[in-house]
Image (cartoon, helix red, strand yellow):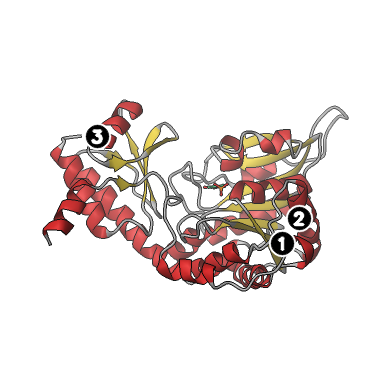
Amino acid sequence: MWCDLFVTNTAPIDLRSDTVTRPDEQMSAAMAAAEVGDDVLDHDPTMRALEERVAQLLGTAAALWVPSGTMGNLIALMLHLKRGDRFLAPRGAHVLNHELGSAAWLAGGMPEPLDWSAGPGRPTAEAVRAQLGGAAAYDMLHTTLLCLENTHNGAGGAVVPPDEHVMLAAAAREGGLKVHLDGARLWNASVALGVPPAALTVGVDTVQACLSKGLGAPVGSVVAGSEEFIGEARRVRKMLGGGVRQGGVLAAAGLVALDRLDALAEDHDNARALADGLTELGWDVTPPQTNIVLAAVPDVQLTLRRLQAIGVRAVPMSGQVRFVTHRDVSKTDIEEALRRIGGARL
Ligand SMILES: *Cc1c(COP(=O)(O)O)cnc(C)c1O
């Protein structure tokens, strides 16, 4: 008892990201027991099982495991874009700001950010239509792809509702654009909205979803689309050095992760509790829709240092302080974080 109290009162509470989770016993056991083969040579059986399950969840014909969300997005963009093309993405999108410009450097597409006219992280279908039309002159870029993001990380885990998503995808398709969905946290959007993940992929050609964020797998994402796309994606993954041999060890973690979709609701509850508590303490917080809390402060770096000093870890994001809840922080941890922040008068 005394020991428990001691630990809760001193251990750092890590709210930097939902990627800091560690495999629990059940996941480690599944990894250790995984049936494996050579996935580069002729497909690993556990990889195959994971890919089939994800394709079904996302409502696509096929899926491919990839080591990271960044590689999943890059593979899709490399297959959708060529030099001289332009792609549209909501301002602050991960593909624009957090992938080192690989969409331009490696996939060859010129980015065109779309403003958040429909709400945080959400462009309008009109904004997509305004960017359509063939190149008026030979020296102009061809707009060929819309890259959506749900939830929108930089906008604080903002959710794009299904009706808006459908209109965005339809506007793009009517204009002859392909549609890629960066669904790193699509699972969170699905749980927050109470709709199946496949309801949020309607009209897209390809989608990327992470297993290593809120779902808690140590490694892995999936990129999904048509059989033909996945055939090509497998080639590009190899080209990028992302083929792994006995990958079933990692896919087994992904399969356990997919059993935990519903548990994301607890992270969302904890994010709301954190936001409410911070608001009571006088912080300027955007009410969270999922598991990300953004707080506007006068000096982000100073606040992060002060938080660190009291054992609460956060990161800078979009000029604000970002806290992320995840399966390795409990309701009690959130209460403790609020106690520390209140006690230090931050
Ligand atoms: C984290 C994230 C990615 C990239 O995933 P990694 O596995 O870290 O490469 C892509 N898009 C969004 C929206 C993300 O939040």
Q: Please indicate whether residue 24 sits to the left or right of residue 114 in the image.
A: left
Q: Are marks 2 and 1 in contact (CB under 8 Å)?
A: yes
Does residue 175 appear anywhere in the picture? no
Q: Amino acid at mark 2?
A: Ala
Q: Quadrant of residue 39?
A: bottom right
Q: Which mark is residue 310?
A: none
Q: Quadrant of the C terminus?
A: top left
Q: Quick one: label 3 or label 1, which is nearer the N terminus? A: 1
Per the image, the residue denoted by label 2 is: 233
Q: Quadrant of residue 101?
A: top right
Which residue shows up at 33% across the image and 53% down it? 271
Q: Please indicate whether residue 274 sits to the left or right of residue 138 in the image.
A: left
Q: Residue 298, how many percent across, how many down? A: 30, 26
Per the image, the residue denoted by label 1 is: 225
Which residue shows up at 22% across the image and 58% down it? 332
Which residue shows up at 71% across the image and 55% down it? 243
